[in-house]
Amino acid sequence: MPRLYLTLIISLLFFCVEGQVKLKDLISFGDEQFQKGDYYYATKIYEQAIQMDSLAVDLHWKQAETQRAYKNYVEAAKWYAKVYAEDPELIYPNALLYYALMVKQTGDYSKALALFKKAYKEAALYPDEYAYIKAKQEIKSTEFAIKSIHSSIKNTLSSMPDSINSYDAEFGHLFKNGVFYFSSLKADSINTNEEVYTKFYRTRTYTASFDSLKQTYSSPTQWEQLSAPERSTGNGSFDDHGWYYYSICNDKGYNYQCKIARFKQENGVNQIDTLPELINFEEANTTNPCWVKLKNGKSYLFFSSDREGGKGGMDIWFAGIKSTGDFETPRNIAAINSMEHEITPWMDVDSNRLYFSSQWHFGYGGYDVFESKVLDKMQFSKPMNIGKPINSPANDLYYFRQADSVFVSSNRLGSKSKKNPTCCSDIYFATIDRPLMVPPPPTNIPPDSNRIEFPVALYFRNDYPNPKSYAKKSNLPYNVLYADYLNARKGYLDSVNDKSGLSDFFIGKVDRGYKVLLKLYDSVRNELARGNSVQLFARGYASPLNVTQYNVNLTQRRISSVQKFFLEYQQGELKEILEKNKAISLEIVEVPLGEFAANQSTSDNLQDKAASVYSVAASIERKVEILYMTRIQHQNLQRISAEPLVQQDEIKEGTEVTKRITITHDASELQLSEVRFSQEGLQYEIKSIAENESEVLFIFTPMFTGKHSSCYADLYFEDIKEPLRVYFTFLKK
């Protein structure tokens, strides 16, 4: 509805109210706006009605429901609380439950947990009712949020530029050939599934070109071929034949309905097809198409639908695509679907994982993003929450990954809005070059290590240990280097303007890291004393100062100092244990990354030491991370190892490289069953070259996001539980 027109109507309404318009007419008008989906307008009308009858519980309920639909969680919580307090006859039995849900979506987990427990207790007489089942689930979900809120990945989300995000809602995004596609709803309100159903405002698809050199987006333009009168379009996915699959939604007010169509332009001719009833089930709502081709060459269409045969609400379905182009019968993914909504599927073929959003599984707020591994015969693993910062107390949808960046649509606090701070979704992104390098979690984690929060991050003075050296070994253990760093703290603080930030870095990073290291030392000692071998996985980092080879050697020295710490701390008690029991070992897997994984925006200007040496941004790059500790059991042990890092100083972008790695093992025969690569386009071959030695040949083209390229390959072997990970790092010529 045009805003001028909206203002005029409200003004006339106020005038009429003064003229004693009947309350029931006012309520009826508010109900009409609610059914149209214009929640903002409805809240204003109900507000006037409440002024006329402030004691009407039914009006308070209408306002609560409307604020919830408008995603104004603070206001919705206030009105649900009011209904709960005023409704002893339980005319609205879900008021307490919804009150708790809205509190959770504000991020007040402690208060929400108490309310959920109360709702669960009050609904105990009706164990088959929604309130009881949902409260029981949310108790566990909120406990999960409380326990895991501090253990998520460290990357931060950034909002897309203002040319993309607006005061309305943006979502349904993807990249294709350097073009960013997204949907935008030009309206004051949207429904929980991000689909439009108002009369005058509709979702449209927009495109913006991305300049990789300037890291900028062009001004978006509307995709006119997809604009349909009286309908909304968006949420698309391309196949490898140039077809664009998208949602097209009729305007049916609150009861919107969507179907999946596809578009292709060929020889100047526009082709638009609506998918057959096998996909667009009669009378069902079908949306969020995602086309994928798996590594085995088989293509599938994933989508969300509330068709018959599901588990409740919107479910994730998929249909195989035959060689003829026809669809196979859709299958419900029972392992991930629930009694509530699962929407916005997207599959990462490289990692063989399906990502989707759900409002049921254990999460931080409304919709959270989850992942599920695709197993044999298109079965799916139990969904796992991908954590913060991707997820928030608000709604997080449309997870998508492109190269080293992930994107998500969210109405979290900080999104652009003129009226309600959580009304409308923006698109956010995060660079994930470092999380890409997280090795697979070990299956054999010692009990003592469960109380340690990994990774254990240990920080270093600039150029330490052994400054100005190309040596790969340190002459000092980390505990000595840590004490030296603390002694140099004053000099660092005197060299920067941001003294508060650097002081927090020393307390929150340097000091804390060393304390956690001491806990890890105790766990290692306990395992060795029990007669178990221990393996630690360590990565070394450097800031961008100096040349590549120097930085790689520097990070090796830093890992070496950590090794010396374990062997020399407490008068060398671990070394003594190892010498007494030759059957056990303490192994540290080294990955010296140098500056390959450093933030590309960190200064490397030696003339500006305040930025390149002493700043928090530079200091945080100089570290060793111990990613995990695992116990090595010696019964029927099959050992397998390789150099974990393959590096090359300079190559031209777009160059195909060939790399060989040698694997040593004690298996009678080494059979490679699968290789998973962190980027596209890998070719590989394995052959035996000697007894207990094999060689793997890799051929691929590195992808650069700045001056560096970092990727990895996970090698899975038969009869060996854990994959072998090999890193590749390159410097652009």
Image (cartoon, rainbow, N blue to C red):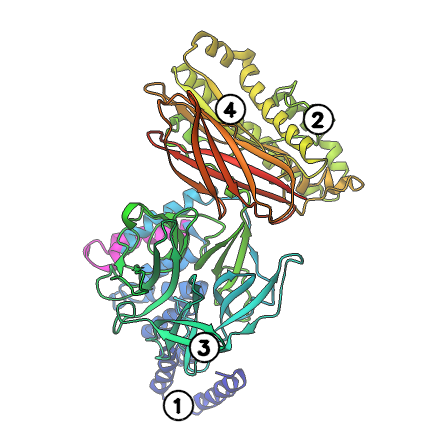
Q: Which SS class for mark 1?
A: loop
Residue 280 showing in the rendered view: yes
Residue beneath disc 1: 21
Identify which amino acid the numbered label 3 is placed on: Asn
**Residues at badges 2 and 4 in contact (C-beta under 8 Å)?**
no
Judge by depth and name the residue closer to the eye, 702 or 357.
702
Farthest residue to the right: give it: 607
In the picture shown, does residue 45 fall above or below 159? below
The residue that label 3 is drawn on is: 270
- Mark 2 against mark 1, which lies toward the viewer? 2
SS at circle 2: helix
- How many residues crowd around disc 1 within 10 Å: few (fewer than 14), some, or many (20 or more)? few
Q: Tell whether position 413 is magenta.
A: no
Of marks 1 and 4, the one in the foreground:
4
- The answer for how far apart the CA atoms under marks 1 and 4 are is 79 Å
- Inter-mark Cα distance, 2 to 4: 28 Å
Dot 4, how many residues are within 10 Å of its Cα: few (below 14), some (14-19), or many (20+)? some
Could you say whether the residue bearing mark 3 is in a helix, strand or loop?
strand
Disc with the residue nearer the chain's start (2 vs 3): 3
Q: Quadrant of residue 159?
A: bottom right
* Residue designated by label 2: 487
Q: Disc 3 vs disc 4: which is toward the camera? A: 3
What's the residue at 66%, 56% (across, down)?
213
The numbered disc on residue 494 is none
Spatial distance from mark 3 to mark 4, Cα to Cα? 59 Å
Name the residue carrying label 4.
588
Magenta stretch: give its range: 110-133
- The amino acid type of the residue labelled 2 equals Asn
